[in-house]
Image (spheres, grey):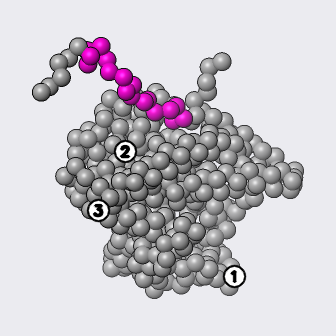
Amino acid sequence: MRKIPFSVQILLGLVLGVALGFLARANDLSWLTTTLHTVGSLFIQLLKLAVPPLVFTAIVVSVVSLRGVANAARLALKTLMWFGITALIAVSIGIGLGLLTNPGKGVTLDLGGAVPPKNTGSWTDFLTGIVPTNPVGAFVEGNVLQIVFLAVVVGAAALLVGEPAEPFVALNRSLLEIVQKALWWVIRLAPIGTLGLIGNAVASYGWDLLAPLAKFTTAVYVGCAIVLFVVYPLVLILAGRLNPLRFFAGAWPAIELAFVSRSSVGTMPVTQRSVERLGVPREYASFAVPFGATTKMDGCAAIYPALAAIFVAQVFGVQLGVTDYLLIAFVSVVGSAATAGLTGAIVMLTLTLSTLGLPLAGAGLLLAIDPILDMIRTATNVAGQALVPTVVAAREGTLDRAAYESAGRRDLTDPEPVADPRPTRQDELSPVPA
C-alpha cells in the first residue's frame, strides 16, 4: 500500500476536523466538542513537553560544534537583520491595509464591556523575558527564550573549557538524539491532533462571531496572505535566488501545523526539520529556528498589532498621525521579543496600544475572535521563521541547493539518511597518505 504523504495526512485531518466541528456545532453535540478539545489539547501538550529539552540540547551541541566556524557572529547578525527587514515590510503592509480599509469605522460594539486582558506587555518584559530568575523555572514554565539564553551561555562555556567539557557535551548529544526520536513519535500523531484542534475551533467559535468584525478579520487574513504569498516569494527570488514553490513544498507541513495548533513554539520541531530538509545546515538551523520561534512573529507582532491599533483608534474616535504610525513600526520591529514567554499577540497588542496611549481595554474587544485570527497569524509567523534561515544560508553559500530542490519530494517523517561508516571499494584501494 502506497504511503500517504505527511502533508496530505494533515490536510485530511483538517478537512475531517472542520466537518466534525460543524456537525458538533449544528447539532449542539457537547460530547463531540469536548472530545475534539481533549484530542487537540493532548497533542499540543505532547509537543510542548519535548520543546525545552530539545531547544537546550540542540543549542548546546550546535554552539560547541561551531568551534571551527569563523562566520558564526556574521550569521547571527544577518539573521537579526533579515528578521528586522521582513518585520518592517510586514508592519508596513498592516498599516497600509488599515489605512485602506478603515476596519474600525462604522463598527458598533459594547465599549462598556471592553476590559483589558489579563496579560499585558511592557518594555521591561524584554529584559525579564530573556534572563531567568532561576534556571529550573525557565524549564518548568517552558520559557523558550530563557532556555535559549541559558543554552547559549552553557554552550559557550563548554566551548571555552574544551576537553574537560567533552563528557557533558557527549551527554547533550545523546539526550538530543533521544528527544528527537521521541518527538517524531508525537509528530506522526499530527493528523489526529489537527482533527481535534480545528474541529474544536469550529465547534466552539464557528463563524457567527466574525459578523460584527468581518472587515477587520478580512484585513488580517488578506495582510497575512500578502506577506505569505507575495512578500516571502519575492524575498526568496531577489535575495536568495531560490524557487518559492520549492520553499513552500518543503515548509508546508510546518505552516499547516502552525495554522491548526496556533503555537509557534509547539510547531518548532516540525519547523526545524523542514528547514533542515530545505538544505539549511543543522548547526545554523539549531540557532535560527528556536530564536525565531520566540522573536520572529510577522503575523502576531507586525500585521496584527498594526491593524488592531488602527481598529481600536477608530472605534474609540482617536486620530492617529504620522508619528503614531512610525511608533507602530518601531514596536513591531524592536518590541516583539518583549512578548517572550507570554501570550504573544495579545501582549504585543497591549504593548503597541500603551506605546500609542490608546485604551488597553480596546484589546478586549478582539478577544472573542482571537482564536480565528490566531490561525493565520501563527502560520505567517512560522513561514517567516523558516524563510529567514533559508535565505541567510543561501546568501552565505551554505545552503544545500540539491536538498532544497528535492525538499518537496521527500516526506517530512522519512528518517534522515545515515552515512555508511564502512569504507567504499575506492577508499580501500586508495593509498593512505603519509
Q: On the image, numbered disc 1 is attached to which residue?
A: 113
Q: On the image, numbered disc 2 is attached to which residue?
A: 282
Secondary structure, magenta segment, majority class: loop
Q: Earlier in the sequence, mark 1 or mark 3?
A: 1
- Label 1 vs label 3: CA separation? 58 Å
Numbered circles on residues, count: 3
Depth check: give the residue in front, 414 or 111. 414
Q: Nearer the viewer, mark 1 or mark 2?
A: 2
Residue 104 in the figure: left or right of residue 89: right
- Label 3 vs label 2: CA separation? 23 Å
- The image position of residue 268, as x and y in percent, is 50, 52
Residue 184 in the figure: left or right of residue 161: right
Q: On the image, numbered disc 3 is attached to which residue?
A: 161
| Residue type at tag 1 | Gly
Which quadrant would the C terminus be assigned to in this image? top left
Which quadrant would the N terminus be assigned to in this image? top right
Q: Give the quarter of the image for residue 413.
A: top right
Q: For numbered disc 3, what is the local secondary structure?
A: helix
Q: Write the start and end of the magenta stretch as one range.
A: 412-428
- The image position of residue 432, as x and y in percent, is 18, 23
- Label 1 vs label 2: CA separation? 49 Å
Depth check: give the residue in front, 255 or 76. 76
| Residue ID at (31%, 35%) | 400
